[in-house]
Structure formats: C-alpha cells, structure tokens
Amino acid sequence: MNSGPDAKPTRPRSAIIAIYDKTCLGARYVHASVRAAGYPCDLILFRDRRVLGTPPTDEEYRLLRDLLARLKPAVVGVSLRSFAFGIAERVTRAAREAGVPLVVWGGTHPTLDPESCLGPADAAVVGEGEQTMVDIMAAVTAGLPLTGIRNVWTRGPDGIIRAPLRPLEQDLDSVPFPVMGDEGKYTIDKGRLHEGDIYLGKTDQPRSYYIIASRGCPFNCDFCCNNAIRRRFEGLGTYVRKRSPENVVRELEAARAAMPLNYVSFMDELFTLDRDWNREICALYKPRIGLPFWAGVHPRTVTDEMMATMVDAGLHLVMMGIQSGSERSRRENFHRSTTNEEILRATRLIHKYRLVSYFDFIVDNPYETRDDLRQTLELILELPRPHNLEVFSLCWFPSTSLTERALADGKITRDDLEDRTSKTFDHFLSDPTRPSNADNQFAITIAWFEQLKVNWPDLTVKFWQNEFDGSRHLLPQGLLRFFVSRDFFWERPELTRRLLNLVVRPMRYTIHSLRYARAGVRMVQAGKSRELIGKLRQRLN
Ligand code: SF4
C-alpha cells in the first residue's frame, strides 16, 4: 500500500490458473517470469490431470471464486489446452464474480485459435507467454490498455485487434526456473482448497520432477499442435530451441535441494533431437543427478549410440509415437515419412536395452481404411514384447493442417474440434467398449488384448507395466493374428471382444488364485495361520 510520499507505488497482483495439470510447465514459467520481474503473482492449480474425466464440482468453482475474492488480483491468467475450453469459461465466470477486472487466456488453445477465446476472455496471449505477461502487468501498472502489446489479441469496437507477434525466445536459459515451495500457491482439488502447491510444495514424499529441456519439434506431423504453432511463428526465429545442458541440470539440482526426488520426466517433444546436445546433458546428468528418467523419442532419432548414452545416464522408459502401421496413411495423412522398417529397428533397439516402452497409435481417423488399420495391427503384433501401447482417438486440434483439410473435405465439422468434444478430457485413450465404427472398434479391441500383461513376481494382470523384467504378454501374437486376418471378425468387434474375454478370463482367475495361494503360504510360514483363517472367513462371508 502507498503509505507516504517516498513509498513505491504498489505493483498490481496477478494470479495464474492452471487447469487439470499440476505440473503445468508453461504456466509455471509464466508465473516465475512475472515474479522475477517484480510483480506479485499467485499460482492456482485447479484440479489435476489424474482426475481427467471427472468435471469440477460447483463447490470447487465456489472455492475458486472465494479464493480470488480474497487474493484480489488485478489480472487473472488462465492457462488452457483445447479440451479445457468449457472449464476455462466457468473459471472465468468465477473470476468475474470475484470482481477480477481483467481475465487473459493463454496456453496451447489460445495460440491455436485466439479468436475463439475473445468473448469469454478479455484478451488472448498467442504463443509463449513469459515476456507477454510481464508486458501486460506493466501496462496494467501504468493504466494503459493492452492493445498493441505483442502477442496479445483483444476485441475492439471494430473487431479483433491482432497485435504483431514477438520473435520466439531463443535464449531459453534466460527463463527463470519454476518457483519451488508453497508460498503464494494454492491447489483446488477433491472438493477442497489446499494452501500450497501439491507438486512443488514442501513434502517428505519422493516424487518425479517434470522438466523441459527444449521447445518445439523438428518434425511437422499434420495432426500435431506443433504443426499449427510452427506455421503461426514462421519467420520469427528458429522454432526448435534448446536450453544449455548446464542450465537443465542446474534446474534439477535446484529441485532436488527443495524436495526429495526419485525420478525425472523429460517432457520435451523429442529428447533425442540433437545427438551432441543429448550426450552433453547425459554427461552432466549422470554424476550430478543420477536418477532414473523417461524421455520421448522418434523412430528416426533412435540410434544405438544415443540409447547406450542415455541408458548409462539412467534412462528407464521411452515414449515413441508410431501413429499408424500404414506407410501410406502416415505419409499422406500425418506427414510422417518413416518406414515400418525404421520403426521396427527403433523398437528393437529399445528392447535391446531392456527399456520400458510406450508406443502411441491413433485410431478413429476418417482417412484410414480397413486395410490401413489392418497394417497397424500387423505392425503392433510385430513389436518386440514386452511393450505398452497408448491407442488414442484422433483429436482435431484447431488450425492444424489435418484439421483444416478434414474441414475442407467435409470429413468433420467445427463441432468435432477438440474445444467442443474435449476428447483429451474423457476419452483420449481408446476403450473397446466405446462406440466407434466397426473397423476402429475391432482395431481398438485387438490392441487392448494385445497389451494385457502379467507381471512376475507380483502376479498382477495389467495393461501398462512399468518394469521390463518380469512383464509377460498374456495372449500369443499368433492368436491375435488369426483374428486380424479374418474379415468375419472385423465385421463383428463385439463378438471378437467376447471370444477373447473367454480366453483371458480363466487366465486371470488362475493368476489371481496363484497370488492368493502364495500369500496364504507365506502367512502360514510366518506363523499367521489364525489371521489367514480370519481373512478367509471374512471373504467367504
Ligand atoms: S514428432 Fe511428435 S511432437 Fe513432433 S510434430 Fe510429430 S507428433 Fe508432434
């Protein structure tokens, strides 16, 4: 408060709200940048992605409104992806009810489709928001309008005012690290307000730290948000940018000084985008951090030498997009020119190093035929085991080349776009019981059964296993190939599911029985026979 002639004027307060993402790297970098520029800024985590699919309750919106009424920010920044459009509208309404004078939306969705945000929000930030949010705070401090601030779109009396875009930040080392600790941070989740940060706040529980060492992707897949963002920033600097290895490792050291860590998650689109850079990070990471980590790779960038380097540094798990087994579809629909041979070579290398693997595929693509889907399943059935699959329903992100083509071809309408369907929210991962056309449902069914695995020595049956050793697929590939080769089953996905269930159910029962029997023997050996009898009685009752 301004209490005398020499006192500095109070700087306006802001709050950044992240929706369904406690790690929210983009929002955290903006939050850290605004604070580093000397403006008070709170961070509010509005639910976490682990409860995706469950919408926020009225009580949680009320908690948010009351919190904002208490904090009294002059500006609220809402960070959102397309799926969260409807939730962001209600979050904005809560902010307005709390008396917040200015609500700005930023993040992936406002970058892809800023026009759609101007209505609910007063302004949309297009692109990376660190410096833009600082400029917004400077304008608010000076009592100036936002018009003309680079990357900010607003609505004027004559329509949308599109300010020019600033060049992409090339010096990523200049971006401050996310703020550790609980001060000025709030979490609204499970119907409660927690005064603190459930991810980077004080804790005794070791956790995984999420970090991004680069921005952008050297590839340009037609369905991916990178495709649209790259086009929007064409001519405004190099799209793929890397932090220095020293800066990356320093952030990890700062995180480890603030909380116990047991794992590191590299959230880069592609951690293997540059061999020398990757090698340098690994060389610093191993002696100074030395924790197991996961990273995203691309079939084209997986080399024996790079895998050996990363495994030596602690690589435990990789994620790799394959998307389709049809080379034609990958090339024509996704703008991915990798061959199946390159993909299989990469998966064999991943297997050679006994890494946990997650391979991504996309279904529900109206440009794919049964033959394309059959090739996808044939490729899946050639992948070295064990592996995990993530089979996604194609999301139509605004402004990507594939979305624009499908809109022009009449394959989809505006109502199929991700801000309307929110697939990421509640049916991102395909489920064989969800209605789809017969061919896609059949493909999802086979992929679902293909990845059922038993873990030894746990004797648990699950889809995703995060251990390489002891993870065994339940069904033989030959059995699944038999189904894939018969059109009769493609036309009857429900029958296929029932038949495969008939095979799997007794296997599951046998494995579970073995687990219970082993637990019983162990209790007897430990002299806990009475306790065992009590437990059995309880179960029988
Ligand atoms: S490789 Fe992955 S991140 Fe890069 S453009 Fe393709 S889908 Fe997007």
Image (spheres, helix red, strand yellow):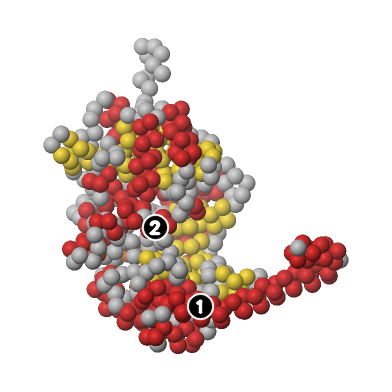
Do tag 2 and tag 1 residues touch (Cβ < 8 Å)? no
Q: State which tag comes first along the sequence, 2 or 1.
A: 2
* In the image: residue 234, left or right of residue 267: left
Distance from the alpha carbon under mark 2 to that under mark 1: 28 Å
Given the image, on which type of amino acid does mark 2 rest?
Thr
Q: Nearer the viewer, mark 2 or mark 1?
A: 1
**Spot occupied by residue 113 in the image (x, y as percentages of width and height):** 25, 50
Residue beneath disc 1: 498
**Spot occupied by residue 376 in the image (x, y as percentages of width and height):** 37, 78
**In the rendered view, would you say 390 is above or below 248?**
below
Q: Which mark is residue 424?
A: 2
Q: Nearer the viewer, residue 495 or 313?
A: 495
**In the rendered view, would you say 375 is above or below 182?**
below
Q: Nearer the viewer, residue 511 or 31?
A: 511
Given the image, on which type of amino acid does mark 1 rest?
Arg
Q: Residue at x 72, y 71 (%)?
A: 516
Q: Which mark is residue 353?
A: none
**In the rendered view, would you say 83 is above or below 61?**
below
Q: Secondary structure at mark 1?
A: helix
Q: Which quadrant of the view contains residue 301?
A: bottom left
Q: Residue at x 75, y 69 (%)?
A: 519
Q: Residue at x 29, y 64 (%)?
A: 223
Whether residue 352 is visible here, answered yes or no, is no
Ligand 1: image quarter: bottom left
